[in-house]
Every structure is written in C-alpha cells, then in structure tokens.
Image (cartoon, helix red, strand yellow):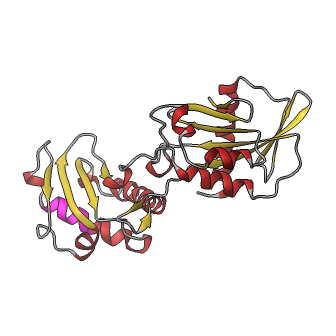
Amino acid sequence: MTRQDKKAAERAALEALLAALSVVPAGVEEGETPDFVLALDGRSVGVEMTTFQSNTSVDGQLGRRQVESEWERLGNAIEVFRQARPELRDLNIGLMFHGAGPPRAEHQAFMEEVAAFALARAAELTDDDVQFWPPAYTSPLMTKYLRTIYLRRCNYAIWHSNIVAGSIGLPDSTLVKIVDQKAARPFRPTDELWLAIQSTTRISELLLPLNGAADFEAIPGLESALGSSPFARVFVFGPGGLFQWSRASGWT
C-alpha cells in the first residue's frame, strides 16, 4: 500500500468513526502523531489511526499479511494475464498453495504453467470442480507452490486462492501490544487523545469480538495498558461493530 493509499484509508476510517459517533468536527487537520487533529467544541482532539494485525502466520513461517500482499500482487497480474488470453476466460481455477504464492519475479512463468495445464484439460471440464494433485502436474513452479489445483468451466470464471481464507482474529494479547506500541510514541500536544484501531476484511486484519465488549474486558493486561496510556478513548471499529473504551466507563 502506498502512502497515499494509506492516508486515504485512514480518512475513510475516520469518517466512518465520526459518523458512528454522530460527531461533526469544526475542522480536521491531517498530520502525523496523531494522524488527525479534530476541532470539537473548542477543544483539540488528536486521533491516532492504526489497523489491527493478527500475529497469525502461514505454515508457521511467513506472516499472514505478507502472504496476503503477495497474493494481491499475483491476483492483479492474473487479471491482466487473463484479459490477454480469451481462451482462459471461462476456466475457473482454484489455486491451493502450500504457503505463500510465488514472488513477483516468477509471476509470469507461474501463470503460463497454470494456463498450459488448464488448457490441456479444458475439453474434459464441466461446471463441477475437478481436483488435481501432484503428480498430475509436474511443471516446476506449480509443483513448488501448489498443494492442489481445482478446475471447472464457468461463465463468471475467476482464479481464486486459499490464501484469502483462514482463522479470524479474536480479541487477544495482540491488542495489548498495539496499545503499548502506540502509547510509546511522542504525540503532538492536544487537549485529548484518541486511538482508533480499524479492522478490515482481510483475514490478517479482521477482528471479530464474538461476545461483544466482554471479549475486551477478558484480555489479560489490556486494562492496565490502557490505563497507563495517554489515550482518553480507544475505539475498535470493524465488522463486529464499534467498541469503545473510556476511562470513565471501560468497554462499551
């Protein structure tokens, strides 16, 4: 993600947060540490934005976010590749990787191997998935990266991957680390400081409190980390709703 994309995502998250709180600031100043300073009721409120990232890894090696990033790059390359190859348009291809996908330098060769394998079997495919394991494929990059591959014909075909699936993060000690890391930063002076932790739809950045605010209250060390931090309010904003911690009322 470029710096420009990051700031755009932070602005969108801030707008969502303010809308959820029914807050309309008199002004918003962008900057660093904190990312935004709001003019609210004659006071300055600093808002530091961050994204939740779980500590999960793929096959106990690479961090899940790194693996997702590699797949996103490959996915973009695949779309360009498919547009230039009309014979592939109705071939739905499921790529089940051992771990991470191939690095950028190998994208073209990997896609060519997958395309050749799929086209060689195109005549026998129907709208039902057919699964292929080694040694059904022997090309070097497919063998190196793929655990298995699924092929079928489909009018709305895509190339998809197991990388976008995985365990969803639950509130745990990761949040303590996030609070501690952010609390250690030197912030510009403001009348009040907030921390907003955004959850996204990426598996590595997805946080789902199953039991609501009670999940946050049960995390060992989190209350202590929050209490010693400079933050007057902390928000966790994601698919499970908006959760808020404040010194006066704890988690709601």
Of 200 and 177, the residue lying toward us: 177
**Residues shaded magenta:** 113-120
Q: Quarter-wise, where is residue 79 in the image?
A: bottom left
126 drawn magenta:
no
Residue 103 occupies quadrant: bottom left
| Front residue of 196 and 222 | 222
Task: Locate residue 194 relative to residue 76 in the image: left or right.
Answer: right
Residue 59 image offset from top left, x and y in percent: 34, 65
- x 49%, y 37%: residue: 209
**Which residue corresponds to the image point at 76% horizontal and 44% vertical from the top-left?**
231
Location of the N terminus (image quadrant): bottom right
| View extreme (left): residue | 124
Residue at image x 75%, y 49%? 229
In the drawing, does residue 112 fall left or right of residue 168?
left
Residue at the extreme right of the image, as rendered: 42
**Nearest the camera: 127 or 194?**
194
Q: Residue furthest top?
A: 22
Q: Which picture quadrant has residue 58?
A: bottom left
> What secondary structure prevails in the magenta region?
helix
The number of callouts visible is 0
The image shows residue 6 at horizontal and vertical percentages of: 64, 52
- Placement of the C terminus among the 4 image quadrants: top right
Left or right of 56? Residue 13 is: right
Question: In the rendering, at what x and y percent does residue 220 appear?
Answer: 56, 48
Q: Position of residue 46 (x, y in %)?
A: 81, 42
